[in-house]
Amino acid sequence: MRAETDDSGLVVGALDIGIASSGSIYVRDLLVTGEAPVVEVRDAQFLPRESVQLVIVVLDNTLTVYADGELLFEELEIMGRTGITGVTLESSSSATTCLAANVWGYGWE
């Protein structure tokens, strides 16, 4: 997830890449201003209890995502933004768990 904040620290936009409980992978690019988010979904068969290796490449206004070596999103057009990058767990159940290991982030101009 990459969250963009304004000068007061409030989140004004976010880029979110995730795996749904159905096993599909999604990209959600949104502005908090009330505009409808841009959502792209790829059907996949990722099982909730199995690990998945994600490689996410964001260059300017494009996003490419590999999952376990398979290209799922190639140069998907996204909003260019700066902000805080992190890993989050989004669930309606308190029993849901997620492990993120070996997370790397690079930036260059």
Image (tube, rainbow, N blue to C red):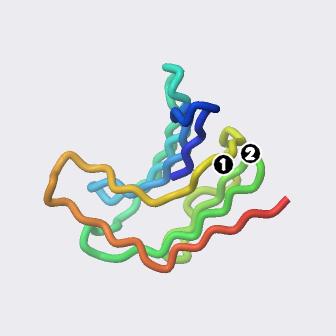
Q: CA distance from mark 2 to mark 1?
A: 8 Å
The answer to whether residue 86 is left or right of residue 44 is right
The answer to whether residue 70 is left or right of residue 46 is right
Foreground residue among 100 and 83 = 83
Q: Residue at x 36, y 76 (%)?
A: 51
Q: Residue at x 51, y 70 (%)?
A: 54
Q: Residue 29 appears at what percent x and percent y?
A: 55, 39
Could you tell me the amino acid type at mark 1? Leu
Crowding near the residue tagged with mark 1, few <14, some 14–19, many ≥20 C-alpha atoms within 10 Å: some
Q: Residue 108 appears at what percent x and percent y?
A: 80, 63
* Mark toward the start of the polypeptide (2 vs 1): 2
Q: Residue 30 appears at what percent x and percent y?
A: 53, 34
Foreground residue among 24 and 35 = 35
Instruction: Determine whether the residue tagged by mark 2 lies in a helix, strand or loop.
Output: loop
Q: Residue at x 33, y 60 (%)?
A: 23
Residue bearing mark 2? 61
Quick one: which residue is furthest to the right in this view?
A: 109
Residue bearing mark 1? 76
Quick one: which residue is furthest to the front in this view?
A: 8
Q: Is residue 6 above or below residue 61?
A: above
